[in-house]
Amino acid sequence: YYQSGKYMYDLAIKANDAGDYFPIWGTCLGFELLTSLTANKNVLQKTDTDNITLPLLFQKGFQSSRLLMNATEKLINDMASEPITQNNHMFSLLVQDYNNTSVLNSFYRLISTSIGIDQKEFVSTFEAYKYPFYGVQWHPEKNIFLWRTDQAIDHDFHAVEITQYMANFFVNEARKNFHHYSSTDEEAHEVIENAVRTFYPDFRIGEIFYFNYTGDYFVDKYG
């Protein structure tokens, strides 16, 4: 996982340095991977932040971030005043470690922090200064797409608006990249609809896409 992520991260750095706009989005483990790749070491610490919803503590200058500069005042107030972001992680980048790690605080702009059950303050949202790289330790996608009753997920209107905003923002970032397939036929063979989609109502993830499908791992493993 780390080596695959490093390969893509290095390609994105190289592409952007060459003028090819290539954005990266990291959610949860992806966020954690970005911190390790940039710092070239593990900078995470264990926290009590598994399966909880938290508000965001916005940091000075967050309004000038690319990620949130176009967010409405209402959306910002919702994220700041309501426990509306779903967290499902056991490790975090503590604010003190971000502040004490120059390679991180010079590379990433701190947008928001959050405080877990153990009262440890951790980085919850950041973006790179120079590159179109974005990281959220929380799960914006789950507000719409994951409906497990054992998961602390907010599905109300405000929460859904947050998911939509984040998705629209990053899709617009991807539009700035001009990569394209050579033909519509080639593109049709690469879209995710070609994968085998299986729904597991009793499994934590819910939906799984299989690529190069050879059998049902979860049916074989769990019956």
Image (spheres, helix red, strand yellow):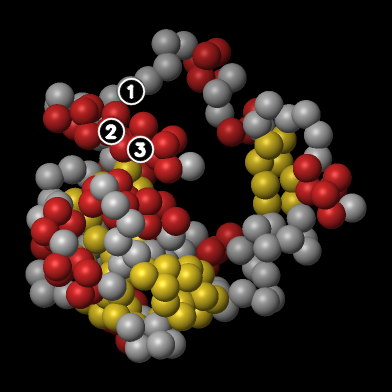
Crowding at label 3, few (<14), some or many (≥20) Cα neighbours within 10 Å? some
Q: Which residue is mark 3?
A: 6
Q: Are marks 3 and 2 in contact (CB under 8 Å)?
A: yes
**Eyeballing the image, is 131 above or below 92?**
above
The first of marks 3 and 1 along the sequence is: 3
Q: Is residue 43 left or right of residue 183?
A: left
The amino acid on which the numbered mark 2 sits, given as a three-letter code, is Asp
Which residue does the image show at 22% across and 55% down from the upper left? 127
Q: Is residue 166 visible?
A: no
- Residue 150: x %, y % from top left: 67, 76
Q: Is residue 132 visible?
A: yes
Circle 3: element type: helix
Report the mark closest to the observer, 2 or 1.
2
Q: CA distance from mark 3 to mark 1?
A: 21 Å
Count of numbered circles on the image: 3
Q: Which residue is mark 2?
A: 10
Circle 1: element type: loop
Which residue does the image show at 65% across and 58% down from the upper left? 205
Q: CA distance from mark 3 to mark 2?
A: 6 Å
Residue 198 versus residue 41: which sits nearer the camera? 41
The amino acid on which the numbered mark 3 sits, given as a three-letter code, is Lys
Crowding at label 1, few (<14), some or many (≥20) Cα neighbours within 10 Å? few
Circle 2: element type: helix
Q: Quadrant of residue 113?
A: bottom left
Report the mark closest to the observer, 3 or 1.
3
The first of marks 2 and 1 along the sequence is: 2
- Residue 174: x %, y % from top left: 32, 38
- Disc ID at residue 179: 1
Q: CA distance from mark 2 to mark 1?
A: 17 Å
Q: Quadrant of residue 177?
A: top left
- Disc ID at residue 149: none
Which residue does the image show at 33% across and 83% down from the upper left? 120
